[in-house]
Image (cartoon, rainbow, N blue to C red):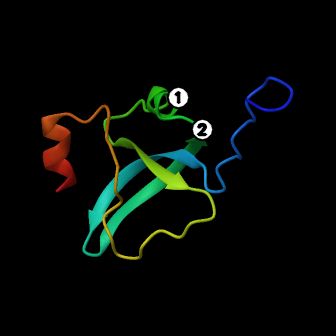
Amino acid sequence: MSLFGKKPEPPPDPHPEFWVVGRTHRVVPNGQVWELLGIWRDRDSAIDHCAHEHDFVAPVRLDEAMPIGAEWEGIYYPRLTTAAARRLK
């Protein structure tokens, strides 16, 4: 407790996490061709905006570089079916 009876607020996260929503169009030899559909503050809102089986959500942190060539950690296709997964390969 502080001098005034309230606990001080923690400082804001300098690298807040946001959720990218994208749509994969095809797989190419060095990765995937995809389209950016939007960015949301929370995972559930991002998932709500996935309408197609090739739509994905993935976390990204503000002001932090993504590793080049690495698999996107945390990527998730919430509407993906087994048949759609076979077409993406």
The percent position of residue 31, horizontal first and vertical second, equals 31, 69
* Picture quadrant of residue 1: top right
Instruction: Kindly identify the residue that appears in the image at 27 percent across and 62 percent down.
Output: 27
Residue, disc 1: 45
Q: Tell me how many marks there are.
A: 2
Image: 54 above or below 44: below
Instruction: Kindly identify the residue that appears in the image at 42 percent across and 73 percent down.
Output: 67
Q: Amino acid at mark 2?
A: Arg
Cα separation, mark 2 vs mark 1, equals 8 Å
Instruction: Kindly identify the residue that appears in the image at 43 percent across and 33 percent down.
Output: 50
Image: 82 above or below 71: above
Please tell me the numbered disc located at residue 41.
2
- In the displayed structure image, the side of residue 11 where residue 78 appears, left or right: left
Q: Closer to the camera, 35 or 19?
A: 19
Binning the other alpha carbons within 10 Å of mark 1 as few (below 14), some (14 to 19) or many (20 upward) gives some
- In the displayed structure image, the side of residue 61 where residue 81 appears, left or right: left
Q: Closer to the camera, 84 or 17?
A: 17
The percent position of residue 40, horizontal first and vertical second, equals 58, 39
The percent position of residue 6, horizontal first and vertical second, equals 78, 25
